[in-house]
Image (cartoon, helix red, strand yellow):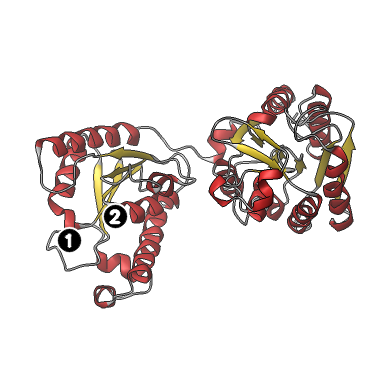
Amino acid sequence: MSQTVLLISTLDTKAEETLYLRGKIEEGGPRVLLMDLSMGAPSGQACEITPDDVAAAAGWDIADIRASRERAKITSAMISGAVSIAAERFAAGGLQGVVGLGGSTGSLMASEVMRALPFGLPKLMVSSTAALPGLATRYIDTGDLMLLHTVVEISGLTPLLTNVLDRAAAAAVGMAAVPAPTPESVRGGRPLVALSMFGPSEKCAHQVRLMLEEAGFGVIGFSAAGVCDRAMEDMIGQGYFAGVVDITPGGVGEYVMGGMRSAGPHRLEAAGKLGLPQVIAPAGVNLMSPRKSRYKPDYHQRRKYDLDKLRTFLRLNTDELEEVARAFADKLNQAQGPVIFLVPTQGWCSFDRPGGAVYAPEEDRAFTEELRRRVDPQVQVREVEANLEDPAFAEALVQAFLSLAPAPA
């Protein structure tokens, strides 16, 4: 059975280039479903999924879309309709890849559709604006999509553009031949554990992974820098995991404090909603990384640690630690499954040790005590006499997890 690739573009502005790309993909074997997200005048070009279809899927009439001057509103509507159609096609087994072609608006729309589709489905965004400051991160966000920067404008089939489109078609054909994973295929008969980590908690995460694998679990790690830990929440919600060892939930506090590692408003919620067992540690929770352009006056006097030339961690004060503890408690109290929160008493990451610039265990107790006061009885808060990166703490995390989710037979 041949693969089917969804090609998303705007035929009112990029018909010639889109049809060329379509033809090249079909030369490679896959069938192409062309989705037109045009909000302007009809292009006159035939496609499988018309702007009328997309607008209708969002509850709109395409005539109203074209007549509206509320750009943000109609763009959102077209994205909503496109997501609905693409998700339906994927669920029916009718998609093996997605390709987008566009400038800034087209790329924003197509990439949002891609991000709504599950991990592992091949996704390629061919964009003339991929290199503009800030846009690449917006296009990718938590999605597993590839960006191909055209460099030249998508305007006329010039030799340089056709070369880019030829390469895009070849990439799409190759990726479409790789089956998308499912939770069942990823598990491979083993229960999977989601594991959060970042550089200053990497040693602990490595030890936890090895011990859990020895116990019969599969372990999938996520870098907790504010993007992949959000993606972890999405994949937990999609049913990949049987439990979570959340070593580095600092994105919760970073969201509260407005830091660069913010993981958004829904971090630390997906596992609880599903009733999955959770073991949590506070790596990075006593730190924040605000943009230096947004420093408050007192930030310059804070104890700090320069992780590298781009990232500086500032210590939270006791009031902030208590505020973050309340945010944790609010989330964990909603959990439908068992939760154990382990707190190391001798520092919460590799550089948070005696003699270090940010080491202040007596201040960290403000977090621990406020958390204990706020959580419901089903959330256990325990202290471990160790640094978070010590082998004894990794062992405690694993034993706590095994007490909630016994090793598979």
Question: Label 2: how many residues lie within 10 Å, few (<14), some (14-19) or many (20+)?
Answer: many
Write the residue at 26% across / 59% down. Answer: 49
Q: Categorize mark 1 by other alpha carbons within 10 Å: few (<14), some (14-19), many (20+).
A: some
Q: Nearer the viewer, residue 20 or 140?
A: 140
Q: Give above or below for 360 relative to 139.
A: above
Asked if residue 192 shows in the view, the reply is: no
Q: Please name the residue shown 48% across and 37% down the image.
A: 181
Q: Secondary structure at mark 2?
A: helix
Q: Which residue is mark 1?
A: 12
Vertical order, 126 against 333 (above or below): above
Give me the residue at 70% from left, 22% from top. Answer: 210
Report the number of numbered marks.
Answer: 2
Q: Looking at the image, is 404 positioned above or below residue 294?
A: above
Q: How far is the residue under mark 1 from the one under mark 2?
A: 11 Å
> Where, quadrant-wise, is the C terminus in this rendering?
top right
Q: Position of residue 275 (x, y in %)?
A: 73, 51
Amino acid type shown at disc 1 = Asp
> For mark 2, what is the residue?
106
The quadrant where residue 204 appears: top right
Looking at this view, is 143 or 317 the one in front? 317
Give the x, y percent position of residue 264: 59, 53
Query: Which quarter shows the N terminus?
Result: top left
| Mark found first going from the N terminus, 1 or 2 | 1
Q: Toward the viewer: 384 or 278?
A: 384
Residue 183: where, in percent of width, then height? 56, 40
Residue 188 lies left or right of residue 324; in this view the side is: left
**Would residue 328 appear left or right of 346 to someone viewing this image?**
left
Camera-side residue: 129 or 341? 129
Left or right, 10 with reference to 158: right
Residue 88 in view: yes
- The part of the image, by quadrant, that contains residue 305 is top right
